[in-house]
Amino acid sequence: MLSKVERLPEAVGRVGHHGTGRVVRHVVVIGDSVAAGVGVAHGEDTVAGCLARALAAPAATWAIHARGGLDARGVRGLLDGPGVMDDLAAADVVVLSVGVNDLKAAHGLGRWRTDLDELLGSLVWAAPGAVVVLLGMPPVATFPALPRRLRGLLGARAAHMDEVGIDTARRYGVRHLPLGADLLETADAFAADGFHPSARAHSRLAELVVELLDEHAKGEADAVG
């Protein structure tokens, strides 16, 4: 049934720059089709571009390392690609989108935990100066492209995967960003395939990441004070 979802291209453009003057923030987004901007015209309008635009004070760069269809093991393999480790080493913020393809492939929770553990461990090691953000599992029960019965089944499994994600992220000091149904509740929240987020949803997702980063910065300031 998932094979009937319309295949949309990934966003054009994998790197960019916002603002002028000295660059103070480097944003890297890594992962699956959401990170790659499937259904969004240009990288500027993905969570990577939107986040860099929001963090450009006075300037920020963004880079995307992602490919549609990748599960956690596949995303871990991206780290071996040209330039990825250099981008991660310079990153101030790393956003990871992963899990939906593990869900689609019906990977067990044991495999998901093991693969996510290795992936997060590798990311934290490769980006020692960055705040790493793991996007929670999306609210798949709201996806228009999925049959109603399948939405409920996948939604329940996604919730269990999210529990694993929260626990694994905590152990590595990674920030977990829960994604509630309100992220995709508007009529224009989905791309044309009814499965991937639209440019509007990417913009909202970037706003949520900024809010999480602000909470992180406040927590560090309180700890110092």
Image (cartoon, helix red, strand yellow):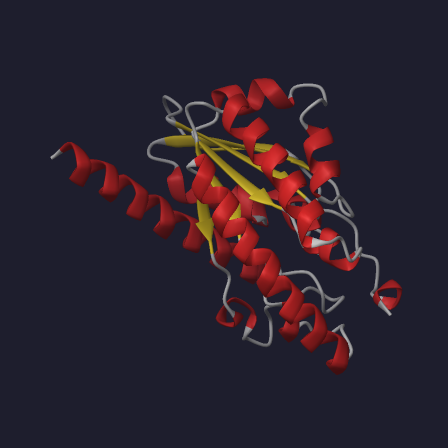
Q: Which residue is at 52% across, 23% downward? A: 125
Q: Residue 202: horizontal and vertical position, in percent?
A: 55, 55
Q: Which residue lies furthest to the front in this view?
A: 110
Q: Is residue 138 visible?
A: no
Where is residue 106, by image quadrant?
bottom right
102, above or below 217, in the image: below
Q: Residue 172: horizontal and vertical position, in percent?
A: 46, 35
**Quick one: quadrant of the N terminus?**
bottom right
Q: Is residue 9 left or right of residue 40?
A: right
Where is residue 6, by image quadrant?
bottom right
162, above or below 170, in the image: below
Comparing 221 with 63, the one in front is: 221
Q: Residue 148: horizontal and vertical position, in percent?
A: 74, 82
Q: Which residue is at 16% across, 32% downward? A: 224
Q: Can residue 103 be seen in this view?
A: yes
Q: Residue furthest left?
A: 225
Q: Is residue 175 left or right of residue 38?
A: left
**Quick one: quadrant of the C terminus?**
top left
Q: Residue 223: horizontal and vertical position, in percent?
A: 18, 36
Q: Which residue is at 80% across, 55% downward? A: 105
| Total numbered labels placed on residues in the image | 0
Q: Which residue is at 31% across, 43% downward? A: 216
Comparing 198 with 137, the one in front is: 137
Comparing 201 with 106, the one in front is: 106
Q: In this view, does 197 lie to the left or right of 23?
A: right
